[in-house]
Image (cartoon, rainbow, N blue to C red):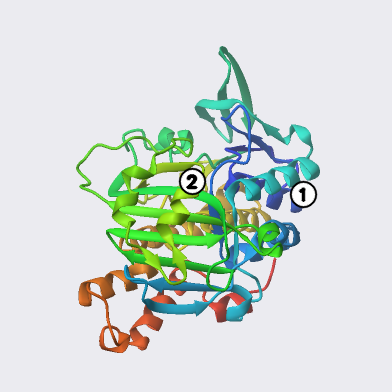
């Protein structure tokens, strides 16, 4: 593919920024068009699995990510009584060649944005450009943007390749699927927050407690706090309601009051963490519904394709959403490098990525690897004296291994994979 190919990326989120860095490494000069007028360090915690960290390492980012985040050492599942169901090492401790990194989403986004501007130039990211429409004109595509803050001002650009990385409410996707409608809510509401706390468990542990209808997820996200002997702790509280109830559009900036959910967790005071106290120590809490979309039969239309949540929005289960967008970026650029035409490249990219990500969407609807907590809840709702009488270690290992294979981070296969 010629280096002179004009590439427009719609959306400067994690997927769009990683794609820009990967394209630049291969000699391309993409331009990102971001709807938000300003880009700041928003959001809460995020996990990057080893297969995604591998991609970011090849882009020269691992040191910055580890400086800002935490190399997660273990993942644990507990029941609602705080009894341990499963523990497994993660990242380097599990024998991967790359760590699992827990990090503040805003810090991750800030690092990626800084690297894009350093490597591609300050004009590589155009903010305040809200995509209004696109028009396929043969081999090229015309994109019309409304400029934020001036509704009457528009910007038009033409590109040989358009990458729709504009999230779950993707305008690019809606152009090709105009009747799709809003995202699908599964009845679960998530409350998320970050606060300073004491270290818990190993200090680099990620845990999940509860079951399908009530769950608490928690992990540290700051290397600086850990090195100083404390923790900047990200947590997620989840409750499930009637999915037929109407829900509000998800929004990272919708603040919530702990009184809406904390009473349900009032007794979740464990030997290793006081969950009510952690929530009460959190200065700001955000609420949003757990949503996804049905997998679509096609991502690429002529010189236009989808990437990340625009192509495969999924429930935040298994720490996979951002990681899969990063894998998309690598696969797309590898396809462009390997083929002489955009059509052939996009066909190869879609063949590699569309069905595997659709399988993850479907698996996450069934709780993914977190189903072990629901199985224990169903079999021993009052707790247990002997876990082996409730669920065998073989069953636990099989569930964990199956999801790793499905999501592309089976250790042996990943470590054998040659870097591009």
| 2 and 1 marks in contact (CB < 8 Å) | no
Q: How far apart are marks 2 and 1 (CA)?
A: 22 Å
- Residue at (51, 76) in percent of width and height: 410
Q: Is residue 194 visible?
A: yes
Q: Position of residue 111 (x, y in %)?
A: 70, 48
Label 2: few (<14), some or many (≥20) within 10 Å?
Answer: many
Label 1: few (<14), some or many (≥20) within 10 Å?
Answer: some
Quadrant including the C terminus: bottom right
Q: Residue 105 carries which label?
A: none
Q: Position of residue 413 (x, y in %)?
A: 56, 78
Establish if 289 lies above or below 33: below
Disc 2 element: loop
Establish if 193 lies above or below 162: below
Q: Which quarter of the picture shows residue 335?
A: bottom right
The disc, 2 or 1, on the residue closer to the chain's N-terminal end is 1
Q: Which mark is residue 300?
A: 2
Q: Can residue 315 be seen in this view?
A: no
Q: Which quarter of the picture shows residue 179?
A: top left
Q: In the image as oriented, which residue stretches furthest toward the top?
A: 152
Q: Where is residue 45 in the image (x, y as percent from the top left)?
A: 54, 53
Establish if 112 lies above or below 249: below
Establish if 352 lies above or below 135: below
Q: Position of residue 327 (x, y in %)?
A: 57, 59
- Residue at (40, 39) in percent of width and height: 256
**How many labels sit on residues?**
2
Which residue position holds label 1? 27
Disc 1 element: loop
Compare residues 326 and 351 and report the one nearer the observer: 326
Q: Which quarter of the picture shows residue 230?
A: bottom right
Horizontal side of residue 242 vs 337, given as left or right: left
């Amino acid at each position: 593919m010629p280096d002179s190919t004009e590439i427009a990326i719609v959306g400067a989120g994690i997927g769009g920024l990683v794609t820009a860095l990967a394209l630049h490494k291969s000699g391309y000069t993409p331009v990102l068009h971001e709807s938000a007028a300003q880009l700041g360090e928003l959001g809460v915690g995020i996990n990057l699995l080893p297969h995604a960290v591998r991609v970011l390492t090849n882009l020269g980012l691992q040191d910055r990510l580890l400086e800002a985040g935490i190399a997660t050492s273990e993942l644990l599942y507990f029941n609602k009584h705080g009894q341990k169901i499963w523990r497994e090492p993660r990242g380097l401790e599990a024998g991967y060649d790359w760590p699992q990194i827990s990090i503040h989403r805003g810090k991750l986004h800030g690092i990626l944005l800084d690297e894009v501007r350093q490597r591609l130039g300050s004009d590589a990211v155009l903010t305040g450009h809200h995509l209004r429409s696109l028009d396929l004109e043969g081999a090229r595509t015309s994109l019309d943007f409304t400029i934020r803050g001036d509704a009457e001002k528009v910007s038009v650009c033409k590109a040989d390749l358009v990458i729709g990385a504009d999230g779950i409410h993707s305008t690019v996707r809606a152009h090709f699927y105009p009747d799709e409608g809003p995202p699908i809510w599964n009845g679960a509401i998530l409350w998320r927050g970050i606060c300073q706390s004491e270290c818990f468990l190993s200090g680099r542990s990620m845990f999940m407690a509860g079951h399908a209808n009530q769950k608490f997820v928690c992990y540290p996200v700051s290397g600086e706090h850990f090195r100083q002997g404390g923790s900047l702790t990200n947590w997620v509280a989840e409750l499930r309601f009637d999915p037929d109830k109407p829900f509000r559009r998800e929004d990272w900036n919708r603040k919530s009051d702990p009184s809406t959910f904390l009473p349900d967790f009032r007794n979740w005071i464990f030997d290793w963490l006081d969950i009510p106290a952690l929530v009460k120590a959190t200065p700001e809490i955000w609420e949003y519904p757990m949503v996804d979309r049905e997998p679509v039969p096609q991502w690429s239309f002529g010189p236009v394709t989808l990437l990340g949540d625009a192509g495969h929005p999924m429930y935040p289960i298994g720490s996979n959403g951002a990681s899969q967008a990063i894998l998309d970026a690598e696969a797309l650029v590898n396809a462009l490098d390997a083929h002489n035409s955009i059509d052939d490249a996009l066909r190869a990219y879609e063949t590699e990525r569309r069905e595997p990500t659709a399988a993850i969407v479907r698996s996450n609807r069934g709780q993914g690897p977190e189903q072990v907590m629901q199985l224990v809840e169903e079999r021993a709702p009052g707790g247990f004296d002997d876990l082996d009488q409730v669920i065998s270690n073989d069953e636990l290992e099989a569930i964990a291994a199956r999801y790793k294979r499905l999501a592309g981070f089976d250790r042996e296969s990943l470590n054998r994979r040659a870097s591009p």
